[in-house]
Amino acid sequence: SEQVILTSIEALDPELAEEIRRRMFTFEDLLAVDNRGMQAILRDVSTDMLTLALKTASDAIKQKVFNNISQRAADMIVEDLEAMGPRKLSEVEAMQMEVVKVALKLEEEGSLVIPGRGGGDELV
């Protein structure tokens, strides 16, 4: 039902639909995703996209990401973050939204469960 409503809103006002999506599930909400789910998300996200998305992320979300990629990849991202100059906040937020879209797509396909969004179903 969520998708149907958002699709209807998107037909009338794409910006409003995007804002609703942004508020419904945020980049920081990825902390609730289990490690297997996080790995699935990270497989579908480019390193450049992920690096930019992590620019303003909390230490907790960075650690969650780093725990689910190889040490070499984590070291490269940390190095790139340290070397990265100032970026527009809107660019960073756009990359974070792209990562969220990947998570939502995987959830829609049934390959990922995002706790708190399962229609009240308890995970066992």
Image (tube, grey):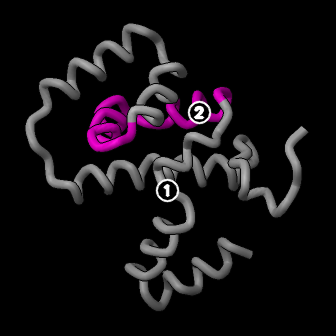
User: What element does badge 2 sit on?
Assistant: helix
Residue most extreme to the top: 72
Residue at (36%, 41%) from the top-left corner? Answer: 57
Q: How many labels does the image show?
A: 2
Residue 104 image position (x, y, % from top left): 60, 54
Task: Please state which amino acid type lies under the numbered disc 1.
Answer: Thr
**Where does residue 75 sit, x and y in percent of width and height?**
32, 13
Q: Does the magenta stretch include residue 44?
A: yes
Numbered tag placed on residue 37 in the rendering: none
Q: Name the residue under label 1.
A: 26
Q: In which quarter of the image is the C terminus?
A: top right
Looking at the image, tell me whether mark 2 or mark 1 is earlier in sequence order: 1
| Residue 5 % position (x, y) | 64, 81
Q: How crowded is mark 2: few (under 14 residues within 10 Å), some or many (20 or more)?
A: many
Image quadrant containing the N terminus = bottom right
Residue located 38% across and 17% down the image: 74
Question: Seen in the image, is 84 located left or right of residue 100?
Answer: left
Q: Say whether residue 53 is left or right of residue 88.
A: right
Is residue 42 found inside the magenta-colored segment of the image?
A: yes
Examine the image and state in which quarter residue 18 appears: bottom left
The residue tagged 2 is: 38
Q: Which residue lies furthest to the left in this view?
A: 85
Kindly identify the amino acid type of the residue bearing the numbered disc 2: Met
Report which quarter residue 56 is drawn in. Answer: top left
Mark 1 residue element: loop
Q: Badge 1: how crowded within 10 Å, few (<14), some, or many (20+)?
A: some
Left or right of 66: which side holds 50?
A: left
Q: Is residue 99 above or below residue 26?
A: above
Give x and y (percent) for residue 10. Answer: 49, 81
Q: Is residue 89 above or below residue 85?
A: below
Q: What are the residue bounds of the magenta stretch?
A: 35-58
Distance Cα–Cα, label 2 vs label 1:
14 Å
